[in-house]
Image: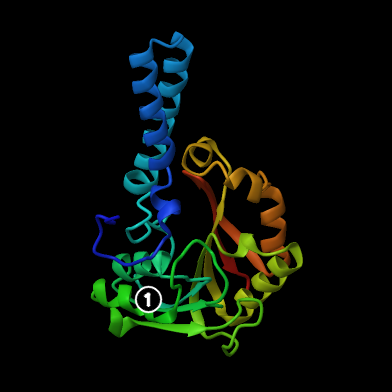
Amino acid sequence: MPTFSKYEFGYSWFVAYGHLVPLALAAALAAVAAWRRWPRWVSVLAAVVIVWAAAGLFLMNVAFGINRPMALPTERFLASGAGRVLDAGAGSGRAAMGVLLSRPKATVTGLDIYEGYWGIDDNTPERFMTNARIAGAADRAEARTGDMRDMPFEDGTFDAVVSAYAIDHLRPDGIVEALAEVSRVLAPRGELLLMIVNVDWVAWLVSPHAIAHHPRQDPARWRARLEQAGFVVEEEGRKPATLYFLARKRQ
């Protein structure tokens, strides 16, 4: 299945194009229902499934752009366009490529445990660097293997950290550990752009299975976690299927 993108983020077929299965089945059901003159409700049901699947396919691949570098939810993150940035839980690099392309004087280190399955086929540092080369920014990027709960970096190494749909996949105690590590590796007054999965109507359309894996987010709880880790929240907002926080380390 083509990705209609020059990037190689490697999301599994069923993640990016899984809606094609119910779309094809519903279209076949509608055709058979019309041919056999089945009750009208069968055709109506098939039409509903077709509309849902087509909308999900559009949102995932066009609006959300799963095969494109991530558009950052706020322009306030690293507004100077320069600095040392860590992508915590980088995977194949969608968020990192978004930073590299929109912040042309920034360098990005992608950190990921690079084991287990998180919706990406062949999730490796090499895939991350392949996408950095495609973005024309390999000289400003590196990929490191490591756990964001125990980062292999010295205190104050980075000016900013971005983390997209990664920290929220940890257990509660792991979230506390990861946020503490983010604070540790940030320089004084460093920035954190945290994006987590938010179960909204877009999530229902794009990925109904997310309902089972992600509870409805409590922004107040996340603000408390960030404050406990030594951050001041400067901006909070919502994007499709996303709750985000822009926070700054106190000192």
Q: Position of residue 220 (x, y in %)?
A: 70, 49
Classify mark 1: helix, strand or loop: helix
Q: Quadrant of the N terminus?
A: bottom left
User: Is 17 situated above or below 5?
Assistant: above
* Viewer can see residue 214: no
Q: Is residue 188 visible?
A: yes
Q: Residue at x 55, y 57 (%)?
A: 234
Q: In the rendered structure, which amino acid carries the disc numbered 1?
A: Arg
Furthest-right residue in this view: 173
Q: Quadrant of residue 125?
A: bottom left
Considering every residue shown, the one lying at the far bottom of the view is 154
At a point 43% along the width and 59% down the height, the residue shown is: 12
Q: Nearer the viewer, residue 166 or 9?
A: 9
Residue drawn at point x = 58 percent, y = 47 percent = 210
- Identify the residue shown where x is 44% and y is 78%: 124
**Image coords of residue 22 (percent x, y):** 44, 36
Q: Residues within 10 Å of mark 1 (few under 14, many from 20)?
A: many
Residue 51 image point, x, y percent: 39, 28
What colour scheme does the image use?
A: rainbow
Residue tagged by mark 1? 127
Q: Is residue 179 above or below residue 169?
A: below
Q: Taking 139 as reference, is 173 left or right?
A: right
